Image (tube, helix red, strand yellow):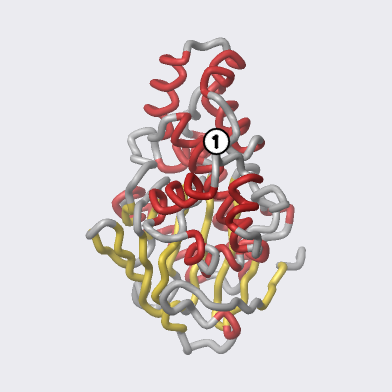
Amino acid sequence: MPPIETIGTTIGAAIGAPPDWDAMDISVPPPALRLPGISMAGFSQRVPGTPAPMNISMVAHPSVTLLIDLSDEDDIVYDSQGRTGRGSAVIGLLPGELRTSGRVGTCLQIRLQPALATAVFGASADLSGTVVSLADTWGHSADGFEGRLRAAGSWHERFAIATEVIGRRLDTSPRVDPEVAHIWRRTLARRGRVRVEGLADEVGWSRGRLCARFRSQLGITPKRAARLVRFDHAAHLLAAGRPAADVATACGYVDQPHLHRDVREFTGLTPTVVARAPWLAIDDVAWPDTWPATT
């Protein structure tokens, strides 16, 4: 059986009260259980039966997130723009000020590039600005999926189950237009420093057609997507300890106030506070192959 990479990690100051990462293991799947454009990480307490208290703000990033609560009784609570829920959830792009709280024993987090999330969650799923329970998205099949994950005896089994279920949905569901998928990949590769006109020329579409198709299929405009990807790169540089002025220059912002405005719009926070976000502090551990190096 291929080994599961399990890593303990420590973080510094964080927004609100983060989980006790010193008491938690982070597991990632081996290469054989990784699907292109999809990444997974498992979080579990080193001492079973002692779930960690959590109260943090999650920072927006350019992926759709499936958060599967494998604790005993739907212990994760989420609050997004005044709407609350608990248990497993699908977190779309740009969910606004999203806070998660409760007690974390075991959970699986899956990040999907939006072009793939449409196939996994259905063409009618709203991938932008929402947090929806997994049960509302997948119906009765959500219970079976969670049940299999809970019954699994190891993270290797859980990752195998998740890869099987998501892979089957990808194989049997319609995908977004190839042109839309290409534009998303280009936006990621250029870290958001793209022009819509240039992207339209690459796929032979008019700007109007590109914007309409992109928004109808991914729930976000190409320009907004580019800003989100650029913000994500900036947030990781801030978390790595780079001064805000240097980050603004490296990411193509006009100046530091421009960076400040984007950070405030996406998170409601200042660059200084975002730099301490607990999810950013462990991204290089939980998602080692997801984003380009923050240099």
Q: In this orientation, which residue lies closer to the viewer: 10 or 15?
A: 15
Question: Which quadrant of the view contains residue 267?
Answer: bottom left
- Counting from the top left corner in percent of width and height, residue 232 is at 55, 49
Q: Is residue 95 left or right of residue 236?
A: left
Q: Residue 281, position in %: x, y?
A: 59, 67
Disc 1 residue type (three-letter):
Asp
Q: Is residue 287 above or below residue 224?
A: below
- Looking at the rendered structure, the number of numbered marks drawn on it comes to 1
Q: Is residue 95 left or right of residue 257?
A: left
Residue 41, visible in the rendered structure: yes
Q: Position of residue 20 (x, y in %)?
A: 52, 83
Q: Residue 151: where, in percent of width, then height?
A: 50, 71
Judging by the rendered image, the residue that carries numbered circle 1 is 171
Find numbered disc 1 in the image and state the secondary structure of the residue it sits on.
helix
Compared to residue 156, the image places residue 73 above or below, namely: below
Picture quadrant of residue 217: top left
Q: Quadrant of residue 118?
A: top left
Residue at position x 55%, y 25% from top? 195
Q: Is residue 140 visible?
A: no
Residue located 35% across and 66% down the image: 87
Compared with residue 41, is residue 18 higher up or lower down, i.e. above or below? below
Residue at horizontal 26 percent and vertical 56 percent from the top: 81
